[in-house]
Image (spheres, grey):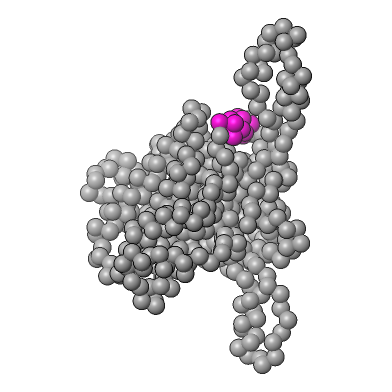
Amino acid sequence: VVELFEKIIRIRKFIKTAYEEDKRESDRELYKLYNQALSFISSEISDFCKVIVKNSDEGEIFDNMLFIDEKYKSVIKIHEDLKNISSIKILPEIKSFLSELDSEEEKLNKFNLILTDNYSFKERNLGKKILKDLNDKYQKTPNINNTHTFILPKIEFSNPLNWSILVHEYGHLVLENESDSFISKFESQGDKLNSSDKQLVRQWVEELYCDVFAAKHLGPAYLVSFLSINLLNSFDCSHFSNSHPSAYLRAENIKSFLRKYDADFSSSSTITNYGKLLNEAMLNIGKTCNKILNQLPSSQSKINETNILRTFRAYISEKNLMNLNTSYSNENIKSIELLLEKLKKGLPIGTIRKPLDAKLIKDLDKDSHSISLDDINNWKNASIERPTTHWEILNTGWIYKIEHIKTSNLFFSDFDSNIQEKLDEYAEHIDKLDDILLHSISSSQIIKSIEK
């Protein structure tokens, strides 16, 4: 429900930003129109929450999921109608974020970004597409460069936490095509595939690769973004398509990869709720999927998602294709804790000082003669700020958002109060966090950590 409210808030933010940039009278009227529709949906959700708080009977779960799914589709429909409103300027922070996805500076100008009316994150080679379109019409082949474009939903234009999905999309560019080799291994286990099933598995494997690629570089932040985007669409979450395995299967794949490297922050007493909340979210998705699948006709497809996932895990382990990019050592976890303290104070987290180790602190409490030259050098190093990385900014942001915004009682208490006031209050929290993270990205000189 909180995710649904946030989508509404972000649509309003986009419309308001578009109007402030253009100030066309037609947009002003559309702004009013869309806000009226969003207010109506918000009121319906608020009334629904009053009911489920009083009656949380297990038998009502499926009906509740139907309601949320229906309201989610209504909000997404309004998002699609944003094509009627002037678009907005691309934030420079998004380009800064994207520029860190490639270590070769000369390639940076070949990346473009488009805000789309559809709620989807994609990567497209528009140069290749245009060339194909022209070749269909003309005999002469034009000279057109390959131009890779990242496609971002309009309402995510100022939400750095969900930009992590762009790292998945970048994975489509840099991962070698291992799908044919994987299919051979899969078939060697007795699961023979026809040509259409091979194409389906080939596309699924690429998506699973890109999920692991993003998790490799961003850690739990990618999983949280993935869950927040897919939680609302419960029915699609439970089913696969020709291009993607089910969101539940993908989430299990990401979680398994992170667990393999103990990358859930479970060793930190300060931020242990991060890992706990991830596990709870996965359990809730599992229950939701099972409920839906029990209510719907069984699939006739010969594709067994579980076997594919099991084989995929064994395959990447055997080939040593993916190792975690960031070490989740106690020192790195300590850095996250220090950044979290800065964020709680409303400070940007673009830079961080290296934490002093316990031995140095102990020595400093003693007679100054006991401090060695190495201790002094360690002190100097600790006093120098270093730039933070993608995974540090995004994980710190998600921890703060989960523990201090999403799990607050902002929406789940006193549903008889004015829902518009609650939305405005929640929007203030979201705007403040967005602004701090945007400033952090622009000022961090983020270290290039993604390697081909």
Specify whether 424 is left or right of 201. right
The residue positioned 35% from the left and 46% from the top of the image is 284
Report the predominant secondary structure element of the magenta stretch.
Answer: helix
* Magenta part of the chain: 330-344
Any part of residue 353 in sight: yes
Q: Residue 78 location, x and y as percent? A: 50, 62
Specify whether 81 is left or right of 157. left
Up/down of 56 relative to 86, above or below = above
Any part of residue 20 in sight: no
Name, please, the residue furthest toward the left.
59
Which picture quadrant has residue 376?
Answer: top right
Q: Residue 417 location, x and y as percent? A: 43, 39
The residue positioned 34% from the left and 60% from the top of the image is 307
Q: Residue 408 location, x and y as percent? A: 46, 35
Q: Tally the marks.
A: 0
Up/down of 168 relative to 143, above or below = above
Specify whether 388 is left or right of 193. right
The residue positioned 48% from the left and 42% from the top of the image is 261
The residue positioned 67% from the left and 13% from the top of the image is 363
Query: Which residue is at the front of the view, 59 or 241?
Result: 241
Q: Residue 226 location, x and y as percent? A: 48, 52
Up/down of 156 relative to 149, above or below = above
Name, please, the residue furthest toward the bottom.
139
Specify whether 44 is left or right of 98. left
Look at the image and say whether residue 354 sits in the magenta stretch.
no
Tell me the quarter of the image containing the C terminus: bottom right
